[in-house]
Image: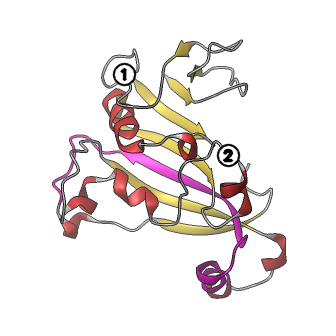
């Protein structure tokens, strides 16, 4: 099963389309806020798409834990968000959270080696694609990453690829594995 989470009007053929509104083409209506429950059995979903959804969710940990519950071991997840220092992240008044390069670390257990927030999901971020502004075409990766630390609108969108880890790992720092970072031109990672 493939689950298009927070699909809105972007209905995908061959996927189960889930949204908080009963729009045409939506298969499952579920509220993604506040400890949501998705009416699917444990270990049933092979692939997830969250395209411009989680920046609208106030508390993402309960959502990511619920998605982990319904994920099969090794299930793949793609999350698309506006990069936190882009105008796109701040212009939409319905955005409640910004995401940055290391934000997805907190969806994995090894990053809780110092604290316990009660989160019991475990997603390993394997790859992050940073969609760079055309003015950085031809710049080295070091130049882009350096600019990303101090300038706005260097990256417009971030695409994170995650894998469900089951059973969940222990919250041990030594188990942290950094993702592969890829810089892509605008329009190249559709």
Q: Position of residue 125 (x, y in %)?
A: 43, 56
Residue closer to the observer: 112 or 181: 112
Q: Is residue 161 above or below residue 180?
A: above
In the rendered structure, find residue 37 and report the number of the disc placed on it.
1
Segment tinted magenta in the rendering = 144-171
Residue 63 appears left or right of 142: left
The residue at the point 18 percent across, 54 percent down is: 116
Inspect the magenta stretch and tell me whether residue 36 lies in it.
no
The quarter holding residue 140 reads bottom right
The quarter holding residue 86 reads bottom right
Q: Position of residue 100 (x, y in %)?
A: 53, 64
Residue closer to the observer: 72 or 110: 110
- Asked if the residue at tag 1 contacts the one at tag 2, i.e. Cβ–Cβ closer than 8 Å, the answer is no
In the rendered structure, find residue 93 and report the number of the disc placed on it.
2
Residue 165 appears left or right of 179: left
In the rendered structure, find residue 76 and report the number of the disc placed on it.
none
Inspect the magenta stretch and tell me whether residue 168 lies in it.
yes
The residue at the point 38 percent across, 60 percent down is: 105
Residue 99 appears left or right of 33: right
The residue at the point 38 percent across, 26 percent down is: 36
């Amino acid at each position: 099963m493939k689950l298009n989470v927070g699909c809105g009007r972007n209905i995908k053929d061959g996927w189960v389309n889930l949204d908080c509104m009963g729009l045409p083409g939506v298969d499952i209506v579920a509220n993604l806020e506040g400890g949501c429950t998705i009416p699917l059995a444990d270990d049933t979903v092979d692939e997830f798409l969250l395209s411009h959804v989680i920046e609208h969710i106030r508390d993402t940990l309960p959502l990511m834990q619920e998605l982990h519950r319904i994920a099969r071991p090794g299930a793949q997840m793609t999350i698309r968000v506006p990069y936190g220092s882009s105008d796109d992240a701040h212009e939409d008044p319905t955005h409640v959270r910004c995401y940055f390069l290391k934000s997805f670390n907190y969806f994995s257990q090894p990053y809780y080696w110092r604290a316990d927030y009660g989160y019991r999901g475990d997603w390993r971020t394997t790859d992050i694609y940073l969609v760079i502004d055309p003015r950085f075409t031809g710049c080295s990766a070091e130049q882009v990453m350096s600019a990303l630390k101090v300038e706005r609108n260097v990256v417009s969108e971030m695409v994170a690829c995650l894998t469900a880890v089951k059973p969940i790992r222990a919250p041990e720092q030594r188990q942290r594995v950094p993702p592969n970072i890829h810089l892509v031109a605008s329009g190249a990672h559709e």
